[in-house]
Amino acid sequence: MFDAVSERLQRVLKDLKGQGRLTEENISSSLREVRMALLEADVALPVVKNFIEQVKARTLDKDVATSLTPGQAVIKIVNQELIALMGETSSALNLNVQPPAVILVAGLQGAGKTTTIAKLARHLKQKMDKKVAVVSCDVYRPAAIDQLKTLAHEVQVEFIESSTDQEPTAIAKSAVDQASKQFMDVLLVDSAGRLHIDDKMMQEISRVHAAINPVETLFVIDSMMGQDAVNAARAFNETLPLTGTIITKTDGDARGGAVLSVRHVTGKPVKFMGTGEKTDALTPFHPERIASRILGMGDVLSLIEEVEEKADKDKAEKLARKLKKGKGFTLEDFKEQLQQMRKMGGLGSMLDKLPGMSSMPQNIDAEKGNQEFTKLEAIINSMTVVERRKPDVINGSRKRRIASGSGTQIQDVNRLLKQFNQMQKMMKRMTKKGGMVKMLRGMGGKMPPGGLPF
């Protein structure tokens, strides 16, 4: 996400950073580039105009112009204004009410509303230790109720039955009563979506809202709709007292215009982002982390949280103990490291959060890297137990057999063995006193020794 706008913003700021002195002329020229980048990213025009005006007013300030490092000062201003644009701080759900806390979820059809409810239910259950129930008031879309039922079972939350011959308002009121009797902490209510905004839809969802008086009313936006998503959010905000938005499909959106626009247009915070199809692909929205990512400064906090959440700590500790005892790092261990990478969202997810990635060659393809991980794993799977534990025994004939069994070439097997040797050396350094510090210095804050696996 934000690929195009991030690249241009970083280029403009790099040029400004190289200027010994900032003038109104070079600032205006640079901001024209920024304006074009934001418009091409599908950011709403009023948002762009306001952002440019704020940045320009602050960069022309005397203290910035006379600063010893004016370029750095401008980067700081742009970062602060991006954060202000998206909402200053993250906004948590308001659950401090008498249970059940009712959350009504609205949105256009196709925005990923029902899947988002399952993701939100999983988040509330696993991260916040809440007893969660879900109900569908969508009596129009074929199989909408069945879809939510299936997802509820997948994430292991309570599903409250409803049917297409019921009125949406009656479903919602009955669900609140049932959730209360079952001592649920949170009730998520899925409303009917439409292909476009119409009076009938607005009246119906207004009646549902009035009947259950939810503590949170969230609007789900498909980020790939760009301007249309923002316009829909504005229309719903005029009808419903929205408390926040959830932006979906951000993993498939290279522009990011909806993310940068929706807070300014609706005045309501973005609370979550959908980052994939699986039910664990929902992350709280942190404006400061998104701004940092756009400017190429990475998002190390999110990466750390992801590693803590998804990495297999038992396997990591087992490997550490093994290395400490002087036992070698094997291809079986290497395979486990590849699987951990995939579990954390693959190469693309990690590159997006690492500082300094903007300076890497443009031909680095995260998707290609993920495919390479799969190939490497297939090669290791084609080896015997002895070959995985003692790679030195792998000669020419063994390489031919391994390549044939994994559907790869001998060159691929050779490349894997070379990468494994580099990884093995790195692990040896890690076990020595001060080895970790040396390894991090070698990485230069960017890449692991040996580079990327392609």
Image (cartoon, grey):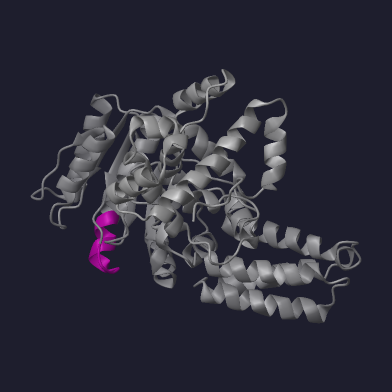
- Up the image or down, 175 lies above or below 241; here it is above
Please state which of residues 273 and 44 is positioned toward the viewer in this rendering: 273
- Up the image or down, 264 lies above or below 328; here it is below
339 relative position to 162: left or right: right
Q: Residue furthest top?
A: 325
Q: Which residue shows up at 39% across the image and 53% down it?
A: 410
Is 148 a magenta residue?
no
Q: Position of residue 418 (x, y in %)?
A: 52, 46
Q: Which residue shows up at 51% across the image and 36% down it?
A: 307
74 relative position to 198: left or right: right
Q: Which residue shows up at 16% across the image and 47% down it?
A: 145
Q: Which residue shows up at 60% across the image and 64% down it?
A: 361
Q: Is residue 453 visible?
A: yes
- Up the image or down, 168 lies above or below 180; here it is below
Q: Position of residue 111 (x, y in %)?
A: 32, 59
Q: Position of residue 264 (x, y in %)?
A: 55, 62
Q: Residue furthest left?
A: 165
The residue range painted magenta reads 194-205
